[in-house]
Image: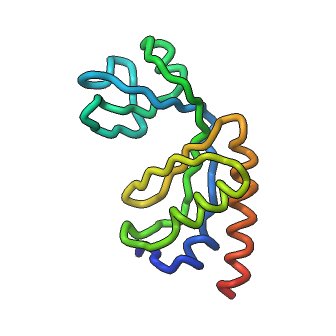
Amino acid sequence: MNAERDLTRLLAGMRPELDPGRYVFTTVDGPAPAGVAPVVTVTEPEGLTLVVRQEEADSAGLAYDYAAGWITLRVHSALDAVGLTAAVAGELAAAGLSCNVVAGFHHDHLFVEHDRAGEALDVLARLSERSALLAE
């Protein structure tokens, strides 16, 4: 499957999907603790940022202050596609929703406030529907 670059087609084909779990951002000095399987890692000078299931963080005694819902945009976006992150983040921001974006090789992943994840899905669905009309 070829990665999509056209912004209108990317937005029309997003197919956002919410993972049922709760995810938290935490940081550690060194590797992830035993029993913790991060879905995202980012190495920073201050430490290793981990995005993990909340229950794993709790079991490992990891501190966090933000619980997120994980939304995957099922469209296969090209890494050099222009505008997808801006369009999605802008739409969510207009609805008062924060968004932390991580790009994987095949898909973009959004971490939004867990208690408002359903609302974020609705916002993304409306954006996708509007874009589908433009793509016709």
What scheme was used to colour the molecule?
A: rainbow
Q: Quadrant of residue 65?
A: top right
Number of marks drawn: 0
Say left or right for 25 vs 49: right
Towards the viewer: 27 or 96: 96
Towards the viewer: 3 or 119: 119
The structure residue drawn at horizontal position 36% and vertical position 33%, both measured from the top left corner, is 49
The structure residue drawn at horizontal position 69% and vertical position 43%, both measured from the top left corner, is 117
Which residue is the extreme one toward the bottom?
136
Say left or right for 133 vs 90: right
Q: Quadrant of residue 62?
A: top left
Say left or right for 80 vs 101: left
Position of residue 125 measured from the top left corner of the image (x, y, whole percent): 72, 62
Image height check: is 131 above or below 104? below
Quarter of the N terminus within the rendering = bottom left
Q: Quadrant of residue 40?
A: top left
Position of residue 14 measured from the top left corner of the image (x, y, whole percent): 60, 65
The structure residue drawn at horizontal position 72% and vertical position 41%, both measured from the top left corner, is 116
The structure residue drawn at horizontal position 56% and vertical position 29%, both measured from the top left corner, is 66
Position of residue 6 measured from the top left corner of the image (x, y, whole percent): 50, 80
Say left or right for 71 vs 80: right
Image height check: is 101 above or below 35? below
Quarter of the C terminus within the rendering = bottom right
Position of residue 106 measured from the top left corner of the image (x, y, whole percent): 42, 60
Image height check: is 125 above or below 111? below
Towards the viewer: 14 or 65: 65
